[in-house]
Image (spheres, helix red, strand yellow):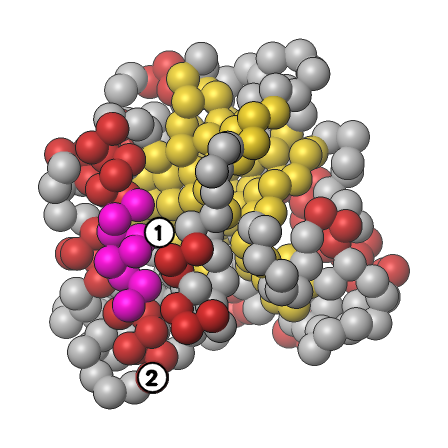
Amino acid sequence: MIALFLILPFPAHSEPYKIATWNIEHFRDSNNEGPNPRTDDDFAFLAKYVRRMNADIIALQETEGPAAARRIFDPETYWFFFSRRNDERLTGFAVRNGIEVKQHPDLTGLNIGGNNRHGTDISVKMNGRWVRMLSIHLQPGCWGDPLNTDKEACRILSAQLPVLESWIDGRAAEGVPFTVLGDLNRRFDNNPGDTFWPEIDDSVPANADLYRVTENRTDQCWGSRYPNFIDHIVLDLISSRWVVQGSFTHLVYDEGVEFQKKLSDHCPVIVIVDPELGG
């Protein structure tokens, strides 16, 4: 399959880069649709947080596609890249104009049994160097249980694990800087029996020595109802050296919990990377 290659006709982006991941929970492109029906006012609420985030590259989950993204992201500021799966809850990216982008074929192997989401796979040029990025939304329901239980959600997540590991190892073997962003639906902290994270963070190949920006942090979304993160930004050994110290942000909402269905049950996770820092 041939990758889609787009060179955006805008002035070059200046470093550093603010990257984020955001699951916008049943985010449809029309008013009053889906499990979380939204009005114009609700779209305006979400757009307020897009402006506050002011990120350069945002990995999206549970978003119907470019038409939905344009409801809250300024289409004069961002271009959109989404999974080609026929579904209303897609993974994808919003990327600021001026950043060169290649879109690769979807990571379809994550779609276990035909009922799970594809990964959206892109490359972006940072500081003259291509960086691979993968937006994913893995199987929910096995947030902390052992992967080898008989629970259906854990069986599916366990089947997705080698697909993700293969993608990570492939990029690491190439020596390509990479980042995995999204809703992994897995709590790694305070889960001493977890085998998921050690499997992907095994330093084989060497660049698969991973850094998770959420490590040992508390999820503040909606009053820390669920204090252990399931939304993560994971960087390889090369790009982990680019993380700007103190730049981690968890963008929580001003509104009360009664607005959760209008906004999202997930809050954006953000970090700044600067390729000038090394690697």
Q: Is residue 254 left or right of residue 116?
A: right
Q: Quadrant of the C terminus?
A: top left
Q: What secondary structure characterizes most of the magenta part?
A: helix
Residue at the location (28% across, 35% down)? 171
Decide: is 80 above or below 245.
below
Q: Position of residue 260 (x, y in %)?
A: 65, 71
Instruction: Specify few, some or many for label 1: CA neighbours under 10 Å numbering under 14, 14-19, or 20 or more.
Output: many
Q: Which residue is mark 1?
A: 214
Amino acid beneath label 2: Glu
Kind of residue at badge 1 = Thr
Between the C-alphas of marks 1 and 2, the distance is 27 Å
Q: Where is mark 2, residue-wise?
A: 152
Count of number-bearing discs: 2
Q: Residues within 10 Å of mark 2 (few under 14, many from 20)?
A: few
Residue 219 drawn at (x, y percent): 43, 61
Picture coordinates of residue 106, whole percent (x, y): 48, 48
Residue at the image position 45 percent from the left and 15 percent from the top: 127
Residue 59 forms part of the magenta stretch: no
Judge depth for marks 1 and 2 and give the one in front. Answer: 2
For numbered disc 1, what is the local secondary structure?
loop
Q: Nearer the viewer, residue 221 or 100?
A: 100
Q: Does the magenta-highlighted stretch encompass residue 166?
A: yes
When asked about the image quadrant of residue 55, the answer is top right
First to last magenta residue range? 159-167
- Left or right: residue 195 versus residue 109 is left
Going 66% across and 65% down the picture, which residue do you hit?
88
For marks 1 and 2 on the same chain, the one whose residue lies earlier in the sequence: 2
Label at residue 126: none
